[in-house]
Image (cartoon, helix red, strand yellow):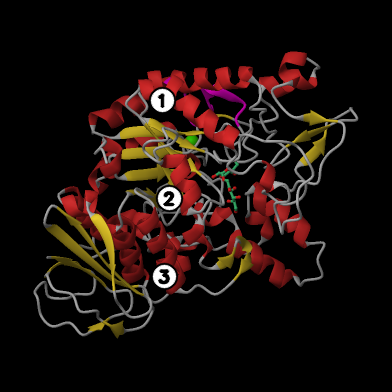
Amino acid sequence: MNREWWRDAIVYQIYPRSFMDSNGDGIGDIPGIISKLDYIEKLGATCIWLSPVYASPDYDNGYDISDYKAIHPDFGTMEDFDRLVREAGERGIKIIMDLVINHTSDEHEWFKRALAGEKKYRDYYYFREKRNNWGSFFGGRAWDKVPGEDMYYLHLFSKKQPDLNWHNPDVYNEICDIMRFWLDKGIAGFRCDVINVIYKNSLDKGKKHIALTGIEHYLGTEGNHEILRRLNKDVLSNYDCFTVGETVFVDPTQANLLMGEDRKELNMVFGFEHMECDCRKLKWFKRAYAPERLISALDKWQRECEWNANYLENHDQPRSVSRFGDEENCRRESAQMLCALNLCLRGTPFIYEGEEIGMTNGDFKKAAELKDVESKNINRILRRFPITRAKRLKMLFRTTRDNARTPMQWDNTAGGGFTEGVPWLKLNGNHEWVNVENEETYPDGILSFYRKLIAYRKNSEALKFGDYNRLPSEKGVYAFERSCNGNKVIAVLNMNGYEERMPAVTGKLVISNCGRVLSNDAKTVMKPYEVMIFEA
Ligand code: TEU
Ligand code: CA
């Protein structure tokens, strides 16, 4: 395996709308991000993944792009963007951007010209007289009627996100051009949105599927692999950059086809299997969280994939401390345990804004407080079912992507230090005590733990590149060793909310989160969410 720079990068994901507002309009922006670069540098991140900042009507918060080469005025100007790349670079921080090429916005010029009847642009999308039975990722059907015509168009996501036709060479060339545009500006790669569904084999009728009827016609098709190889050869291979694919519904075998070093498609992928440890396939079908299920999903990917893009949070998922920890009784300990989990596994770690201070799920009270298009769709669908309002809201609040999108909590002032105005999405009331300023005052706090472990990792060959090997332990305790050229690090994590027996490991304790004396004393019982990291 080559030791490219991105393998030992520490990636910090920024959701620009919610990170830092510089002008009081309640929306985070690029000057806001620039003002926090020192914070990101101090954390130890070496790369920022910037969620979309392109021009967009924001029906899906920027994942519906109306101009791929323009910065959304809410976020600033192209000069601001160039300054961000430059000022981040001066701090040794690279920037990767979101590449959303399964679909555009319906307000993109291509789609508008298609609707106006221009044949060339008609072929950029899928227009059909008859719709098939495919379902949309956001609930409901994947086809909507073209206004004023007896025609339908395909959209796997919202109706404002028509799917691009990847059979059309013009689409391919347009996207190559867009990628070069940003790479030439000095960005270091792309996070590729739903990249394993872009190429549709056919528009034939789909087999019945609980939510995604039709998926067999577009998931991980050979044509999709071929496009990725071509993009790699024609564009990416000419730059010092990397790609991480957001790849829905893949198992390690399929993941390896997308990121195998010899395949020359993507560099790494985000798997979803570990995100299914508290639901059945889809988040709507809840089941109780069991640490053991999270461990076995992670262990499987660690064993079966040469490299992993490790993450526990992003802008689509609930907050990990609310989900896998105990935000009420052990917020600090469980957030630190999750930090160690993310940073000690083999792969490139991705940290989502606010994760490093243990931010929790939103404290929503009314459906009207939610802004996410997916939640609005689901709310509409749920209203048709005979369930109580309380039940409907409970389900909405548990699943809404807005849980991760509440404004970053910098301090305890009215706007959380995020804005001087009214935030676009309700700020969590717990910003009074869960905030960066407060964390800065605790040497044993969550943020300090992140900084400490990131710094430790940077100096550890074993954590950066070492092999992974799971060690025997009690249920819900995850113990594994990472070794490289005789250096060995052992991580022992009690992921249970109760005490559990310590596995037998030998080594020098170097990092812990529950006040252990850093020595080699006999340790028999682990406290809830206790972390111990040893050198052997
Ligand atoms: O997400 C794709 C995706 O699979 C999710 O939308 C998933 O279906 C959903 O989170 C389940 O709750 C990517 C982006 O991360 C997401 O923000 C976009 O909305 C979506 O693509 C469309 O571009
Ligand atoms: Ca702003």
Disc 3 element: loop
Disc 2 element: loop
Q: Of residues 95 and 176, which is closer to you in this image? A: 176
Which disc number belongs to residue 332?
none
Position of residue 165 relative to residue 388, above or below, is: above
Is residue 40 rendered to the left or right of residue 506? Answer: right
CA gap between label 3 and label 2 equals 20 Å
Which span of residues is magenta-colored?
A: 65-78
Do tag 3 and tag 2 residues touch (Cβ < 8 Å)? Answer: no
Number of the front mark, 3 or 1: 1
Disc 1 element: helix
Q: Earlier in the sequence, mark 3 or mark 1?
A: 1
Which disc number belongs to residue 236?
1
Which disc number belongs to residue 408?
2
Q: Of residues 251 and 326, which is closer to you in this image? A: 251
Amino acid tagged 2: Met
Q: Earlier in the sequence, mark 1 or mark 2?
A: 1
Position of residue 191 relative to residue 475, above or below, is: above
- Asked where in the image residue 296 lies, by quadrant, the reply is bottom left
Do tag 1 and tag 2 residues touch (Cβ < 8 Å)? Answer: no
> Would residue 17 be visible to someone looking at this image?
yes
Quadrant for the C terminus in the image: bottom left
